[in-house]
């Protein structure tokens, strides 16, 4: 019998099983027991689903390392919110739809946050950083007939002569682009600042030939309404509400992170989608 045991101990399979048992025992002794409800794992499958969703909304582009880290954090916030909703029984009497009960929990957290009225200094500093959303922009109305290609300038000047003579062909009228009451800054990315400046500076009602970043145009300015700065006192009530909404969102996110302290979060840092 002792000889049999000695031979059995020397078997590689038996040695492997013994080693595995030792490793399992050490892991069990050093790793605290965590219930399934209190464990949140960012598995490779989860990371890959986050990458796939990003690619689907960004024309196939892979998220960078920083972008992926932020997306994983957002997933964790959503998962914590969802778990807390389940813990509070918000799924009872409702369909088991993740988005719905997560939204319920978000509303509870959001509405449970107390926000004080902003001081004048806080409101003023907040407003100055965002005044572009409140100032009234320059509004431009014009018509433009586009021309591209090697002889675009010559074509545009020939059509200008026809328009002035009232003999332009119908296809020119059909190609005309009409821009009505457009904020000046929204035009510059497409046409370039120099082009928009020339339109605004020119006389209204007169056809001209102008070049832009996108090509040559025969244009006519119909109207230009200068914008103006809006002072805080003119929009103080809506600015105060926007300030409180933003502050409430910040505090709600912080409250959600505090709830997350009750969970054990494990991240799999293996690359997903080819990113580190």
Image (tube, rainbow, N blue to C red):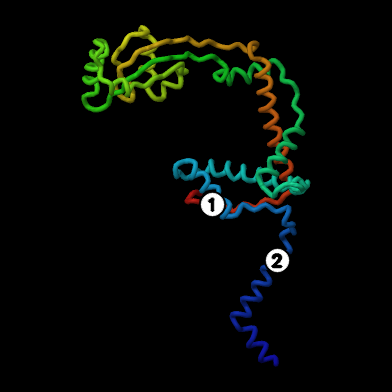
Closer-to-camera residue (243/111):
111
Q: Is residue 13 above or below residue 163?
A: below
Crowding around mark 2 (Cα neighbors within 10 Å: few <14, some 14 to 19, many 20+) is: few
Query: Residue at the top extreme?
Result: 203
Residue 169: percent from left, percent from top: 25, 20
Crowding around mark 1 (Cα neighbors within 10 Å: few <14, some 14 to 19, many 20+) is: some
Closer-to-camera residue (156/23):
156
Q: Residue at x 49, y 49 (%)?
A: 275
Q: Left or right of 11: which side holds 32?
A: right
Camera-near label (2 vs 1) is: 1
Q: Left or right of 268: which side holds 254?
A: right
Residue wearing tag 1: 48
Residue wearing tag 2: 26
Q: Quadrant of the N terminus?
A: bottom right
Q: Earlier in the sequence, mark 2 or mark 1?
A: 2
Of helix, strand and loop, which one carries label 2?
A: helix
Q: Residue at x 78, y 46 (%)?
A: 88
Total numbered labels placed on residues in the image: 2
In the picture, the disc for residue 242 is: none
Spatial CA distance of label 2 from label 1 is 31 Å
Q: Residue 222, located in which quarter of the rendered image?
A: top left
Residue 114: percent from left, percent from top: 77, 29
Residue 83: percent from left, percent from top: 71, 48
Query: Given contact means CB atoms under 8 Å apart, are the residues at marks 2 and 1 in contact?
Result: no
Q: Left or right of 25: which side holds 50?
A: left
Q: Residue 13, located in which quarter of the rendered image?
A: bottom right
Residue 103: percent from left, percent from top: 68, 40
Q: Left or right of 76: which side holds 65?
A: left
Q: Residue at x 63, y 88 (%)?
A: 7
Of helix, strand and loop, which one carries label 1?
A: helix
Closer-to-camera residue (180/203):
180
Q: Residue at x 74, y 57 (%)?
A: 35
């Amino acid at each position: 019998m002792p000889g049999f045991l000695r031979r059995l101990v020397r078997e590689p399979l038996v040695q492997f099983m013994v080693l595995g048992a030792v490793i399992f025992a050490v892991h069990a002794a050093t790793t605290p027991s965590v219930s399934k409800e209190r464990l949140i794992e960012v598995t490779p499958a989860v990371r890959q689903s986050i990458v796939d969703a990003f690619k689907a909304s960004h024309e196939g582009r892979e998220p960078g390392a920083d972008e992926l880290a932020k997306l994983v954090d957002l997933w964790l916030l959503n998962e914590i919110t969802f778990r807390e909703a389940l813990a509070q029984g918000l799924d009872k009497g409702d369909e088991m739809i993740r988005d719905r009960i997560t939204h319920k929990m978000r509303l509870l957290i959001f509405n449970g946050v107390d926000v004080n009225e902003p001081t004048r200094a806080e409101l003023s500093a907040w407003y100055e950083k965002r005044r572009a959303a409140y100032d009234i922009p320059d509004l431009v109305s014009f018509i433009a007939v586009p021309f591209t290609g090697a002889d675009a300038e010559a074509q545009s000047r020939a059509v200008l002569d026809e328009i002035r003579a009232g003999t332009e062909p119908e296809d020119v009228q059909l190609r005309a682009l009409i821009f009505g009451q457009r904020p000046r800054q929204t035009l510059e990315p497409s046409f370039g600042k120099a082009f928009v400046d020339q339109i605004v500076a020119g006389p209204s009602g007169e056809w001209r030939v102008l070049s832009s970043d996108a090509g040559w145009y025969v244009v006519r300015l119909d109207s230009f309404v200068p914008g103006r700065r809006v002072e805080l006192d003119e929009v103080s009530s809506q600015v105060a509400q926007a300030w409180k909404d933003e502050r409430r969102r910040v505090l709600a996110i912080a409250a959600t992170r505090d709830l997350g302290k009750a969970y054990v979060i494990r991240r799999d840092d293996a690359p997903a989608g080819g990113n580190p």
